Image (tube, rainbow, N blue to C red):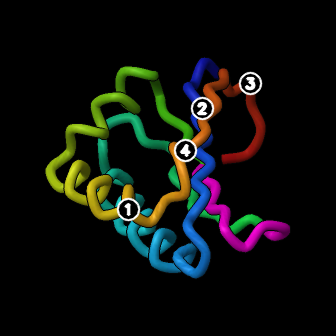
Amino acid sequence: MNKYGFTGIFKAHNGKRDELAAILLQAAGLVSTAKGCQQYIINKDANDEQVIVVNEIWDTKEDHDHALKVDGAMALISQAMPLMDGRPESREFEVLGGKM
């Protein structure tokens, strides 16, 4: 399959998770049409009321990296940063297969 996968784990300040989720959903709408975007899903952690998890699948890592340059992406990042409790965690992976 040879797709690039990325997971971002964002911890919001207390009471700010929904606001952070709204910004990340805007980002999903913005990059969902970017070259190579196969999946961009925003999830609330079922066990931690401060955590949002973003799962992404791209044709290539380069497509993923280029999505950060889409018009409006940096503005959304600027809005999200003050809502986060620390830097996001991330994981990169190679997609082996399954249903998308």
Q: Residue at 44% of width from left, 66% of height from top?
A: 83
Q: Magenta residues?
A: 46-54
Q: Is residue 52 magenta?
A: yes
Q: Which mark is residue 3?
A: none
> Sequence order check: which comes first, mark 2 or mark 3?
2
Give the Cα separation between the discs numbered 1 and 2: 26 Å
| Residue annotated with mark 2 | 5
| Residue annotated with mark 3 | 96
Front of the two marks 1 and 4: 1
- Label 3 amino acid? Leu
Q: Residue at 39% of width from left, 68% of height from top?
A: 23
Front of the two marks 2 and 3: 2
Q: Residue at 45% of width from left, 22% of height from top?
A: 61
Left of 22 or right of it: where is 56?
right
> Sequence order check: which comes first, mark 1 or mark 2?
2
17 and 42: which one is in front? Answer: 17
Q: Quadrant of residue 34?
A: top left
Give the Cα separation between the discs numbered 2 and 4: 16 Å
| Residue annotated with mark 4 | 88
Left of 9 or right of it: where is 83?
left
Give the Cα separation between the discs numbered 1 and 4: 12 Å
